[in-house]
Amino acid sequence: MPDAGDNSGPRWPSADHDPEDAPDKSDSSSQQTTVRVSIPTNAGGESASPTTGENGGESTSTPDDHSWPEADEPADERPSQPAQSTQPEQSAQSEPVTPVGQRQQRSSPEQAQQANHSQQTQRVPYSQEWQSQHPHSGGASHVSRASHAPPSQSSQSSQPSQPQRRYESPPRPPQHPVEQSPAPQQPVERQSPGPDAWPHRSPAPPRPQPSAVPPAGRQAWPQRIGPDGTGEQQAVPSGGPTHGGPAHGAPAAHGRQRPQGVEGHHGPARPLGAPDTGTQAVVPADAHASEPATPTDPPDHESSAAGDGGRPRRRRLLVAVSVGVVLLLAAGVTLALPPVSNRLGLPWAPNAPLADPPEPRDVRLALSGASASGAAPTPQGVAAAIDGLASDSDLGELHGSVVDPATGQVLWERGADTPATPASTTKVLVSAAALLALDHDMRLPTRVVEGAEPGTVVLVGGGDVTLSSLPPGEESIFPGAAHLDDLVAQVKEATGGAVERVELDLSAYTGPETGAGWAPDDVPSTFMVKVQPAMLDGGRTDPKNKASMGQSDPAGNLAEEFAERLGAEVGGETKAPENATVLGEVWSAPVDELVRHTLVESDNLLGEVLARQVAAAEDREGSFDGGAAATLDVLRRHGVDVSDVVLHDGSGLSPRNSVPASTLTQVIQLAAADDDGGVKQLDEVTAKLRPLLIGMPVAGGSGTLAPRYDEEASESGRGWVRAKTGTLSGVHTLAGVVLTEDDRVLAFALMSDGKDQNKARAALDRIAAALRGCGCR
């Protein structure tokens, strides 16, 4: 054996040798290895001793296929290093082995490729005798795999066809003997250790650098546990596991079953017959047991492929989960917003109902007559309730009357027979006359007839001032109004579009277009225009705004709009020929709807129109005087005392109008007469006047009473008072009905000349509310 101090042969540490004190002569880039050797016996049961081959390498006698090694302890040997060209005698004597503690030099890619294609690897059979000599191992022997190490340059040059040695050490045997298949009939080179080659324990090799990444062709070391409990690393071919080799746990080549534990955990075993370019090293188990995998672990192509494919999938999964969480959070925040939760009716909405909605109740949409079954109010009770309120200085001089419609009894009055300016309560008288004189289903027409000359048409006004300029389907301030477009379509169809001139017939109304006593600025204004029998949208400039400014010539504006839509020119006023062919015709809403709108909205123009329609029904001229006279004639004929009534218009704009409070109360009493819950048939007059009550504004709810009854003293009348208002400068009136807490209907009329409009209105509201709250007994 060569001197242990050089690198010409194997160096075996002795028991008193401390490997950690030995100098480290290894290259920092090479990897430390330790060799475990099993020496089989020959056919005669004798141990085969190593000899020197003809090329200077060690060899053994021809082994038997079923021979077993005699060694009872694992042998440690350093992998051979390439011999330098200046020391050829080292390869001639034995394979050079580096001392313990050094690292194996890295083979070049060319050497690894040459070794993989030109050398043969042999397996050494299992050793059963090893188990008998080591009963503490607990099972049959295992065979470890040899790893690839670069062959020495001198061995490659002197033995080009000689296969490399394959050393296998006995691992932990299984619990039951494993039937072994015969090994190939080929000689296997072995190296016999010296008498002192077995140390008491294997020295711990230096820990590999974690950052070192094995290059191509570099050995990688899977770990296993030897039979003596120590750790062991197995060499893997420099090329790494191939996909063509047997899978993990599959039988080995040549029909031989691979024992358990031969493979490392990093990949499949190298197939039989692959070139062996290295040796096997023994490493203590505790050297790497607690360490994570380092860059020196062998590459696992399948695991790497799965990992590389898994990372994008995991990344996509994380992105999808993150997006989902963000969307859920955004949805939660959005649904938590009060506007969203309120609109969707979510349980946590701020305006969510605190309890279930009440059960629906039957509602009668028609007013019933006053009931006479309850306790009847008395004059003393009414006086006690309102005398103090009626003396309010804000009212100025008050004229009023309270009547029980069920009995006709006067319950309270103050100056009731003294005529006073009624203002818009004049419309109560005109509306009552219209309901008594006209058919409630009557409609006012607007016609177009042939003119006296070809290509000329005449637009004849019939009193419908609600005709809408809006397209069909859109409503103006007059519900149910006819549309000009419909009239244009009829004329085009009748004439084939051959219309050259449009003339206007306004002969339905005569006399002045403004009332006596009207202020100069009343026409045009936001509440009145000239009284003409034909116009668009009540003469307003905005068909959807009742407070918009009126037009100076509503009828002329209608003629221009009509001619423009026909593609014709506007002519002057004329009278339509008698028995002229009608080319088109549209109709207004029914009279009772016109009455309702007149009372609720206090529409002055409609008041004048209704008066003229009454005049037409009474064969009077369609003028202010004709309408006033016809109104009084109709009321008188139906039992109303109008002896002290003076009218100059139908709207109440004239301050010259004069009406006693008692007359207003009498008309309302007739409209609210008792029918005993529908049992008794209504009087003919009461039946015709019933729409008068329906059309009156509701306190705090509709029309001109909507913004009123908002004070604490009058809020008890909200919803229970229905009355027509009237206001002029220094004139404040209120006439209507109220339902008391005893379910009795009372008719009243109040007329004040208070100086302050707002204070006078509030004082009138308090009196009506007091009637609601009293039993008046």
Image: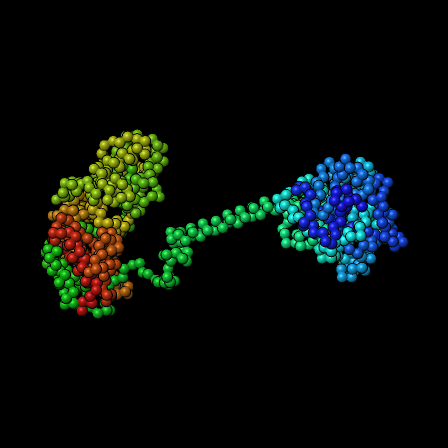
The image quadrant of residue 90 is: top right
- Please give the name of the residue rendered at 82% of the width and 47% of the height, measured from the top-left corner: 190
Point out residue 763 in the picture as x, y percentages from the top left corner: 16, 57
The image quadrant of residue 568 is: top left
Residue nearest the viewer, comparing 763 with 378: 763
Q: How many marks?
A: 0
Q: How is the image coloured?
A: rainbow
Point out residue 56 in the picture as x, y percentages from the top left corner: 83, 40
Residue 660 against residue 568 in the figure, above or below: below
Quick check: 607 left or right of 340?
left
Quick check: 565 left or right of 217?
left
Point out residue 770 in the picture as x, y percentages from the top left corner: 19, 62
- Please give the name of the residue rendered at 47% of the width and 51% of the height, measured from the top-left corner: 328
Residue nearest the viewer, comparing 202 with 149: 202
Point out residue 397 in the picture as x, y percentages from the top left corner: 10, 56
Quick check: 647 left or right of 317?
left
- Residue 628 seen by the camera: no
The image quadrant of residue 219 is: top right
- Residue 57 seen by the camera: yes
The C terminus: image quadrant: bottom left
Quick check: 252 left or right of 267?
right
- Please give the name of the residue rendered at 16% of the width and 61% of the height, measured from the top-left corner: 402
Residue 326 against residue 500 in the figure, above or below: below
- Please give the name of the residue rendered at 20% of the width and 66% of the height, measured from the top-left corner: 774
